Image (cartoon, rainbow, N blue to C red):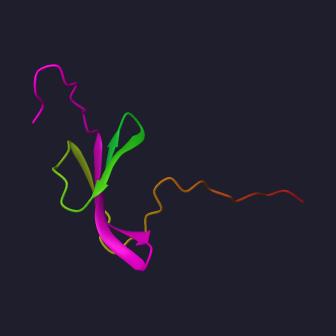
Amino acid sequence: MSSMGESSVVIDTLIRGALVPVEDGYATTDIQISAGKIAAIAPNLPGAGHEVNAANKLLLPGFLNGHTHAS
């Protein structure tokens, strides 16, 4: 809950139940997206207007695509 003087973050999308790599394997967690950026990564985050069910899907938050077609 936001108190007076604090700006509230509007969550555009919630990716729920994704497998995210951690130090000793994988963790099942949620990822909140706000204005095209990751706002939070934690289990059981509150819902958003648009939710994506990522159960049993690997998600690499912040990972850049290193794919190239250079010869």
Residue drawn at (21%, 29%) of the image: 8
62 relative to 15 in the view: left or right:
right
Res. 24 image quadrant: bottom left
Reply above or below: 56 against 59.
below
Q: Give the position of the C terminus as an image quadrant.
A: bottom right
Residue drawn at (17%, 19%) of the image: 5
Residue drawn at (22%, 25%) of the image: 7
Q: Give the position of the N terminus as an image quadrant.
A: top left
Q: Is residue 17 visible?
A: no
Instruction: Give the farthest residue toward the top.
Output: 5
Please state the horizontal and vertical placement of residue 43, each as a whole percent of the image.
Answer: 23, 62
Please state the horizontal and vertical placement of residue 60, each as a whole percent of the image.
Answer: 48, 62
Reply above or below: 8 against 48.
above
24 relative to 3 in the view: left or right:
right
Residue drawn at (79%, 58%) of the image: 69
Q: Is residue 29 visible?
A: yes
Please provide the residue range marked out in magenta.
Answer: 1-30
Closest to the observer: 4 or 31? 4
Reply above or below: 7 against 15.
above
Tag count: 0
Taking the magenta stretch, the answer to whether it contains residue 4 is yes
